Amino acid sequence: MKKLGIQFYDRQNVVAIAKELIGKIIVAKFDGITTSGRIVETEAYIALTDRASHSFGGKRTARNEHMYAKPATAYVYICYGMHHLFNVTTNKKNIPDAILIRAVDPMQGITTMLKRTNKKKLDHTLTKGPGNVGKALGISKEHSGLNLLGAQIFIADDADGKMFFPENKIGSSPRIGVESAGAAALLPYRFYVKGNKFVSGYPNK
């Protein structure tokens, strides 16, 4: 397993990167405890011009400031006052492209994930949806701004630079929950592993 380097994130096509993140492994290490999961669902958000993005029109606030950080920075925001949603920044500093990690297939530290989510046993709900991803991996708003090339949160590859899942197993669709974004809501910027039980929305096959 090899940690992704800056060259993976420092590219212009955030949609392509969102697809390439499918099959990669997100690792979180806090207080000597490691949890990890294979990424099975992502969504891309394009800087400035994407009505579904927090940066649309150049909007820049305390909430979304880390979207404008250098590539390979964690951008975590709170949704509905309770869900901590983890995003990855790409492209260049001050170009706020970002990718939301919507679902992962649990790998390491499942016992810890169950405790964090107050679940008795592993089932498809553990890391299904971005809110559950953050909770299970222990990622919260306080981690926004972390360098993803560091030791606390990082993304790794165990397929030697190739796609872990075959091309015909990766689906695409419009993003979820962005209906107010008009025509942008129809853009096929969501990627997912077909048939994976942790994928959070539809289509999922």
Image (cartoon, rainbow, N blue to C red):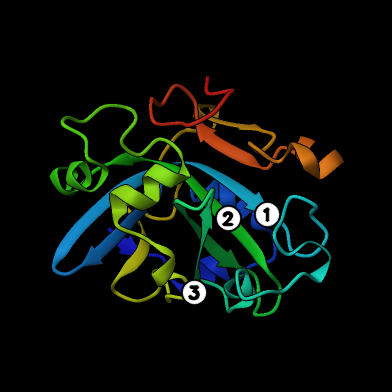
Q: Which residue is mark 1?
A: 45
Q: Nearer the viewer, residue 11 or 92?
A: 92
Quadrant containing the N terminus is: bottom left
Which amino acid type is shown beneath numbered disc 3? Ile
Residue 31 picture location, percent across and down? 16, 69
Q: Which numbered disc covers residue 184?
A: none
For the point 71% across and 56% down, the residue is: 53
**Image check: 30 left or right of 38?**
left
Q: Which residue is mark 2?
A: 99
**Looking at the picture, does residue 53 appear above or below residue 187?**
below
Residue 107 picture location, percent across and down? 23, 43
**Image check: 188 left or right of 84?**
right
Separation of marks 3 and 2 at Cα, in angstroms: 15 Å
Q: Earlier in the sequence, mark 3 or mark 2?
A: 3
Q: Look at the numbered disc 1 and give the secondary structure of its residue.
A: strand
Q: Earlier in the sequence, mark 1 or mark 2?
A: 1
For the point 75% across and 36% down, the residue is: 179
Q: Earlier in the sequence, mark 3 or mark 1?
A: 3
**Looking at the picture, does residue 39 appear above or below residue 50?**
above
Which amino acid type is shown beneath numbered disc 1? Tyr
Separation of marks 1 and 2 at Cα, in angstroms: 6 Å
**Image check: 51 left or right of 30?**
right
Q: Is residue 36 visible?
A: yes
Q: Residues within 10 Å of mark 1 (few under 14, many from 20)?
A: many
Q: Look at the numbered disc 3 and give the secondary structure of its residue.
A: helix
For the point 62% across and 69% down, the residue is: 64
Asked if the residues shown at circle 1 and circle 2 are in contact, with their CB atoms under 8 angstroms apart, the answer is yes
Residue 94 picture location, percent across and down? 69, 79
The answer to which quarter of the image holds residue 178 is top right
Q: Which residue is mark 3?
A: 6
**Looking at the picture, does residue 7 appear above or below residue 138?**
below
